Amino acid sequence: MNVDSRLSSVLHLLLHLMDAEDAIPSEKLATAMNSNPVVVRRTMAGLRNAGLVTSEKGHGGGWRLSCDPERTTMLDVYRALGSPRLFAMGNRCDTPICLIEQAVNVALNDAFQEAEALITAQLGTLTLSALSTDFGERIKVYASTNQENPHAI
């Protein structure tokens, strides 16, 4: 089963941008994500269109956070990605003739809609700032072990 990890990846990049004083080039973000700069630019362009980030061209250019982390939720980021499908499961046929399959579809569709509503409601309560605070606490614990952050960019 293919997993769509774009939301997780983008949240990761946004936290890097929150901590950055300067714009971060796509190449550097791609290294942090073990990805390709072209993929990062394409993804970040969608976030720019949603007003979450800005980009600067030329030497010293790159990406900057442009949204308010206190008010920007994971749901905002999810929507900026185009609201990708949350579930890999689906109906075998969208418009079945079989009455059994129609009953199955109704039951599954209701369950999927309820689950999606719960997930999106939860995403709407979690801000970038809250993620950053959680990261800050984790880095303090990690630093107490006298080790460097293995993922600093």
Image (cartoon, rainbow, N blue to C red):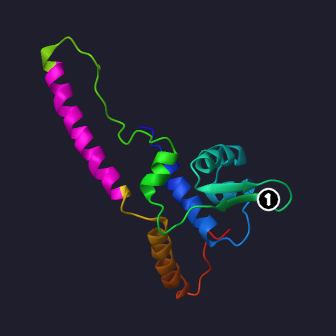
* Residue numbers of the magenta segment: 101-122
Quadrant containing the C terminus is bottom right
Residue 37 left/right relative to 132: right
x and y percent of residue 71 in the render?
Answer: 46, 65
Res. 5 in view: no
Residue 34 on the magenta span: no
Residue found at the very far right of the displayed protein: 59
Residue at 48% over, 84% down: 141
* Residue at point 63%, 65% (across, down): 17
User: Is residue 111 a member of the stretch shown in magenta?
Assistant: yes
Q: Residues within 10 Å of mark 1 (few under 14, many from 20)?
A: some
For the stretch drawn in magenta, the main secondary structure is: helix
Q: Is residue 148 left or right of residue 72?
A: right
Q: Quarter of the image containing the N terminus? A: top left
Please state the horizontal and vertical placement of residue 72, each as a whole percent of the image. Answer: 48, 61
Residue holding disc 1: 61
Q: Dividing the picture into quarters, in which one does residue 151 lie?
A: bottom right
The image shows residue 138 at horizontal and vertical percentages of 48, 78
Amino acid at the residue labelled 1: Gly
Count the labels in the image: 1
Give the image location of residue 81, x and y in percent.
Answer: 52, 45
As helix, strand or loop, the secondary structure at mark 1 comes to: loop
Query: Residue at 26% of width from left, 46% of height from top?
Result: 115
**Residue 71 in sight here:** yes
Q: Quadrant of residue 12?
A: bottom right
Name the residue at the top extreme: 97
